[in-house]
Each structure stands twice: as structure tokens, then as C-alpha cells.
């Protein structure tokens, strides 16, 4: 590289000393916005969908999923506050007029902003991991609605399957092979629960 190019890079390096803190503040603003959005989204999902979805879980899974979601919410709030602190500093911070004092304060503040940003990013990652964990737990442990298998005997034969509906006119049974079969109530001889249907028609 030429001497002129070297001088230009040296000047840029010296300028970075004065622009480092504003650059860190801008990064913190981005993190603050993202974390605030994530926290709001999680809060809305917990309020709108959480109760219904958690009700389908076993007791132990419901308690664990609730703990994961609450912990994620707390982590995202803490991360948002750390990002706000990094972006805007401490309220009522001292304004220094001396050159050396201002330089020391700038270096210390830049270091504090970096620490706050790293902690905010860690809170964000951990919060997202906990939300994903709660979702996986709910998918794995959601209790499916129980199926009611029945064996129906009629004047002409019998069938076995899942009871869909029954009233005074007909019995609806979902079989493995034939879909939903409607059996008139007048032809039903017996209707009883079945453990399995095996190779029922």
C-alpha cells in the first residue's frame, strides 16, 4: 500500500476513538427495538393463546411450560432494560468538561455499553431458547382427545370404529376402511365399548 493510503487508514483509526461510543449506542438502539418487539409478541401470545394451549397439557408439563414462558418473558424484559441502558446511559449522568476526564468517562462508558449489550444479547438468546423449549414441550405432551371405540351390532351384521355421534335416529361410526358410516337406530341390536377394532370393516 502507498504512504497516502497508510495515512488515511491511520486517520480513520484515530477517528474511531471519538466515534466508538456513538456507534455502540446505535447498536444498542437496534437491540432495544428488537427485544421490545420480542417481549411484546411473547406477552400477546401468552395472553391470547397460552391459557387454551396450556390447558391441554398434563399437570407437570403445564407447570414446566408456564415456568419456561415466564422465565423467557423476564429475560426479554431484562434484556430490553439492558439495551435501553446501553443506548441512553444512566439518567442524570455527569457531564464532564475536562478533556482527560471526558476521555476516561468515554472509555468507561463504552466498556459499560459493551457489557450491557453482551448481556442483553445473552438474555435475548436465552429467552428465545426458553420459548422454543416451551413450544416443543407443549407439542410433545399435548393430550389428544380420547377416542371412543364402539362395537355396533345390527340386524344385518356389525361394525367397529370410533363413535362420532348418536341420537334417537342414527348412530355415526368412523371405521378404518369406510369413513363415517351412518347406522339407523332402528337396526341397532347392541352398542358397546370396544378396546380395539382389529380388522373391523
Image (tube, rainbow, N blue to C red):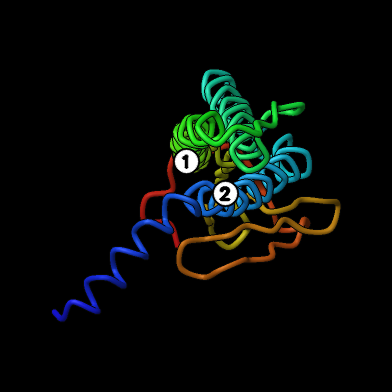
Label 2 residue SS: helix
Q: Is residue 63 visible?
A: yes
* Residue at disc 1, secondary structure: helix
Q: Are marks 1 and 2 in contact (CB under 8 Å)?
A: yes
Which residue is located at x 62 percent, y 51 percent? 29
Give the residue displayed 53% in from the left and 56% down from the top: 159
Q: Is residue 155 left or right of residue 15?
A: right
Identity of the residue drawn at 48% across and 38% down: 110
Camera-side residue of 88 and 21: 21
Res 47 quadrant in image:
top right
Instruction: Say few, some or many: other residues with alpha carbon within 10 Å of mark 1 (under 14 / 14 to 19 / 20 or more).
Output: many
Viewer-closest of 158 and 59: 59
Q: Which residue is mark 2?
A: 31
> Looking at the picture, does residue 75 appear above or below residue 142?
above
Residue found 57% across the figure and 43% down from its top: 147
Judge from the rendering whether residue 74 lies leftward or rightward of residue 23; answer left or right. right
The answer to which image quadrant residue 89 occupies is top right
Q: Quadrant of the N terminus?
A: bottom left
Residue furthest left as drawn:
1
Residue 24 image point, x, y percent: 51, 48
- Mark 2 crowd level (few <14, some 14–19, many ≥20, 10 Å Cα): many
Q: Can residue 129 be seen?
A: no
Can you give x and y, in whole percent of width and height, for residue 152 in the image? 59, 50
- Number of marks in the image? 2
The percent coordinates of residue 181 (x first, y second) are: 63, 66
From the image, tell me which residue sits under label 1.
121
Disc on the earlier residue, 1 or 2? 2
In screen coordinates, is 181 left or right of 129? right
Where is residue 185, by image quadrant?
Answer: bottom right
Whole-angstrom CA distance, mark 1 to mark 2, is 8 Å
Q: Nearer the viewer, residue 145 or 39?
A: 39
Amino acid at each position: 500500500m502507498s504512504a497516502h493510503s497508510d495515512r488515511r487508514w491511520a486517520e480513520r483509526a484515530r477517528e474511531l476513538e471519538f466515534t466508538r461510543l456513538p456507534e455502540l449506542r446505535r447498536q444498542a438502539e437496534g437491540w432495544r427495538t428488537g427485544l421490545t418487539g420480542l417481549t411484546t409478541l411473547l406477552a400477546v401470545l401468552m395472553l391470547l393463546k397460552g391459557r387454551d394451549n396450556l390447558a391441554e397439557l398434563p399437570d407437570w408439563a403445564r407447570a414446566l411450560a408456564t415456568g419456561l414462558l415466564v422465565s423467557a418473558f423476564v429475560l426479554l424484559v431484562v434484556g430490553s432494560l439492558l439495551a435501553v441502558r446501553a443506548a441512553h446511559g444512566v439518567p442524570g449522568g455527569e457531564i464532564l468538561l475536562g478533556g482527560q476526564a471526558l476521555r476516561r468517562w468515554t472509555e468507561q462508558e463504552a466498556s459499560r455499553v459493551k457489557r450491557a449489550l453482551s448481556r442483553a444479547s445473552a438474555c435475548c438468546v436465552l429467552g428465545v431458547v426458553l420459548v422454543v423449549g416451551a413450544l416443543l414441550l407443549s407439542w410433545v405432551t399435548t393430550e389428544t382427545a380420547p377416542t371412543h371405540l364402539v362395537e355396533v351390532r345390527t340386524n344385518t351384521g356389525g361394525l367397529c370404529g370410533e363413535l362420532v355421534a348418536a341420537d334417537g335416529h342414527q348412530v355415526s361410526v368412523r371405521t378404518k376402511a369406510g369413513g363415517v358410516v351412518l347406522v339407523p337406530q332402528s337396526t341397532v341390536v347392541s352398542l358397546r365399548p370396544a378396546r380395539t377394532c382389529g380388522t373391523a370393516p
